[in-house]
Each structure stands twice: as C-alpha cells, then as structure tokens.
Image (cartoon, helix red, strand yellow):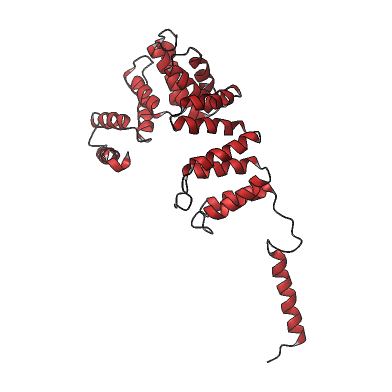
Amino acid sequence: MKLPVSSLLLLFSLSGLFVGCSDDAPGAAPLTPQQKHEKAQALLKPSIELPASDYKGAIQLLREAAAQGYVPAMVDLAGIYLGGSKDGSIKKDRIVAFDWYRKAAEAGSIEAVYSQGFIRYDEGNVEAAVPYLQRAADAGVPEAQYLLGRILLQQRDVKAVEYIRKAATSDRAATVARAAYTMAVVYQKGWAGEKIDLPQSVEWFKRSADAGDPRALHLVGLMYIQGAGVEKDEPRGVSMLKLSAGQDYPAAIKDYITYLQTHDAAAHADEIRAWVERLKELSRPESR
C-alpha cells in the first residue's frame, strides 16, 4: 500500500526533527573541553539512567579534553589509573597515573605536583618524593605541607613543625584533622626541638577532634567524660566518643560499649549488642 504524499511529507518532517535533536547533528557546536569533562564525570557516577559507571566512555572523553589542554581532565585520568576502576575494567597503573600528573603539573597544576610526590613516597622512595612535596608545600598545598612535615619529623628536622602547623591551620578539614593531631603529639612528647607543653597539646587535640579525627575524638571525648585536662562535660564527651566509634575506631567502640554497660545497660541492650557485633566484624581479617 502506498502512503499518501501528505503522509510521506509528515514522516520526513518528523525525521528531520529527531535528527536535529541528536548530539551528532551536522552543524551542532562541538563540546568544549569543560563540557567533555563534565560529561565524563556524569558517566562515572551511577544513576537511574546509568546503573553502572562507564569508565571506558569517561576515559575517552577525558582523553579528548586532556588533549585540548584541559588540566582537570588530566588530573581525573591520573586518579582513575592510580586507583583503578571498581568494575575492574581499568587496572591500576602507577606509571600511567604519574605521567598524567606530570602533564597536569607541566600545565600549571600545583596539586598535581603534590600527587607526583605522594606516588613516589607511597612507593617508598622518600628521596625522590621530597622535591615534589617541597615545591607543592611552599606553594601552599596543605597535603604536601603535612606529608613533608611528617618526613622532616622522622628526620628530627626542626622545620617539621613549621610545615605541619601550616597544614593544621588550613581550610581542608581532613588534612587539619591529621596535622592537628600530629601537632598535639609534638607538644605532648616534645618532638622536633619543641618543649613539652601539655595545655597546648590539649588545644591541638581539641582542634583535631573538631575536624573529625577519630583518634582525637576518642581521646578528647574521654577527657570531657572524666574532666581530665578540661572542664568536665559528660554529654559532650559521650557524643564525641560515639562519633569516633561511628568511624569504626576500635578503641572508641570498646570504650563506648563500656560506658553504655555502666550507665543503665538494660536500657542500652540493643545498642550494646549492635556495637559488639560491629567490633567482631572489624576484627575479621577481610575487614582489615
């Protein structure tokens, strides 16, 4: 059966509409490097429309953006190869990761310089790591300041405290948490030429706890519960202890269980049981 001319014209006109909506339509503006990067990030995040991450599709877009000099794409490529993909489609490859960080660093990313140093440090090559870390630390990268400070601390270099203090007063909570904890220990032990100063040590432990470090939350929580070195504030201390336990810090879980057992155990029976089970899970080899 032949379709009327009017029907054929309608089909052609609708077909033209669909073609015009395609990303590959002739005359459509090409994606910018930033748009390619954003599209790649979307492919890496599972959603209702995309149940699993599309690493290969993302890498293709990232490579295209990187080839156009887009630094964030280079950094993302390095990160993917450094850790590998969750689905196993992309294997870990430190050599490739380091090379992408090198390209990003040459394009002006000081964060990539730190990442180069971190890779060398993680490989156990401290001597090779230091020049990268030094450069990034002096440029103000908190993570580099902290790691370089730790290295210098092990070498008993008095400059260690200067770098760790900078990291501990930065605006990056995760780094502040670790660096402030280290500062607390420096004043507790009298390391790197510093005199033992317990009040200052307590202040650094508190700063670390405020930034979320589980070790500091545990320690400062107990201090508030017992009124040791700080004004006693049991509710605050218990809250900090629970926050630390919630980060799967075994020592905090044990002390929180003990606290519940000695404060109306019957009323907290279910919670105690749950924490005991969590502690057992953490003690299994596969959880370590």
- Residue 101 percent location from the top left of the image: 57, 37
**Image quarter hosting the N terminus:** bottom right
The answer to whether 37 is drawn above or below residue 218 in the figure is below
Residue at coordinates 73% horizontally, 83% vertically from top-left?
7
Left or right of residue 234, residue 147 in this image: right
Left or right of residue 76, residue 204 in this image: left
The answer to whether 198 is drawn above or below residue 116 in the figure is above
The answer to whether 66 is drawn above or below residue 207 in the figure is below
Left or right of residue 37, residue 48 in this image: left
- Residue 202 percent location from the top left of the image: 41, 16
- Residue 170 percent location from the top left of the image: 55, 24
Q: Examine the image and state in which quarter residue 156 appears.
A: top left
Residue in the foreground of this view, choosing between 219 and 56: 56
**Residue reaching furthest to the top:** 195
Q: Examine the image and state in which quarter residue 244 appears.
A: top left
Q: Is any atom of residue 117 visible in this view?
A: yes
Q: Is any atom of residue 274 visible in this view?
A: no
> How many marks are shown on the rendered structure?
0
Left or right of residue 38, residue 133 in this image: left
The answer to whether 13 is drawn above or below residue 173 in the figure is below
